[in-house]
Amino acid sequence: MAHFLSLELGREATPDPFQVEAITSTASTVALRIARQSGKSCVLAARGVMELQRGGTTICLAPAERQTREITRKVGLYLRGTDMVIERATQTEIEVNTGGRFIAVPASGATIRGYTATLLQVDEAAFLPGDNGGEDVITAILPMLTDDGQVFYASTPAGKKNFFAGLFLNAKPDDGIHRIVVRGTDIPRMSAKVERLRQQLSPTKFRQEVLVEMLSDGVSYFDLDLIEKANSEEAAVWPKL
């Protein structure tokens, strides 16, 4: 992991403990609830390269096509630090000489059916499309996973009524899910960025984006920011008489 980070950052870098924990997990399911810009894509790319070395097939889903191109670019960058040879590459797919494949696709059931994968990755899993919080997409992809395959869900939270939130809210003992929660305040290298976000974001957005709290169901009658202002003397909805 440190070697891959040095390729990306151009200097010697030390991986965060959560990154090592995630990519070395042997759990059948890994759920990573993580602050923005904390190194999530590094974990997914490094784990994807590991699967390429094994000759496996990784299917990486993301809500937007732009995100699929970005994760594929990072996988290609990390491959430069290995002895694998890229035999075919596009903006969203890489094949190497081990027989391994990395395929990144937008999260639509119509575009992802028909694959077989040894590793599934769902990037920004809280933002999957669909009226039922992305469950239709998950239903479409899980059958393509081999019996001994592994699935990664990684995202910043986006409320409570989606499939990703349920992985944490409905946790059960011995359910085979390795849950990792990474707050921006947990990462020393992010201290300056966290402080800037604390100053510029509303308290609600800070709690969601940095502290990774699952706050709202997205259909509340009153917006959480409005409720906060109503309880703040500095920004009260009704002035004191």
Image: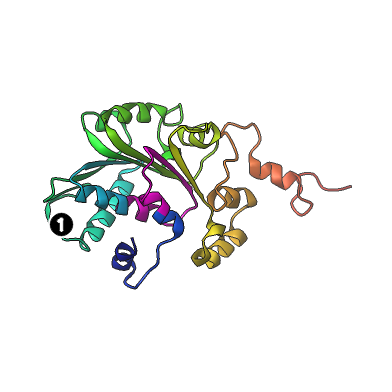
Please state the horizontal and vertical placement of residue 209, each as a whole percent of the image. Answer: 53, 50
Please state the horizontal and vertical placement of residue 194, each as a whole percent of the image. Answer: 55, 61
Q: Nearer the viewer, residue 11 or 134?
A: 11
In the image, is residue 71 above or below residue 169? below
Task: Name which residue lies at 20% across and 61% down.
Answer: 82
In the image, is residue 199 above or below residue 228? below
Which residue in the protein does label 1 denote?
Answer: 84
User: Is there any visible trace of residue 91 in the rendered image?
Assistant: no
Q: Quadrant of the N terminus?
A: bottom left
Please state the horizontal and vertical placement of residue 212, each as a whole percent of the image. Answer: 54, 48
- In the picture, measured across the screen, residue 102 lies left or right of residue 88, that is right
Please state the horizontal and vertical placement of residue 87, each as a whole percent of the image. Answer: 10, 52
Q: Dot 1, crowdedness within 10 Å: few (<14), some or many (≥20)? A: some
Task: Name which residue lies at 12% across and 56% down.
Answer: 85
Q: Any magenta on residue 99?
A: no
- In the picture, measured across the screen, residue 86 lies left or right of residue 62, that is left
Q: Nearer the viewer, residue 63 or 41?
A: 41
In the image, is residue 13 above or below residue 119? below
- In the picture, measured across the screen, residue 44 lies left or right of residue 167, that is left
Which element carries disc 1, helix, strand or loop? loop
- All told, the count of numbered labels is 1
For the record, the magenta segment spans 21-45
In the image, is residue 167 above or below residue 238? above
User: Is there any visible trace of residue 199 in the rendered image?
Assistant: yes
- Quarter-wise, where is residue 226 in the image? top right
Q: Any magenta on residue 34?
A: yes
Residue at the far right: name it.
241
Residue at the far bottom: name it.
11
Amino acid type for the residue under numbered disc 1: Met
Task: Name which residue lies at 29% across and 46% down.
Answer: 68
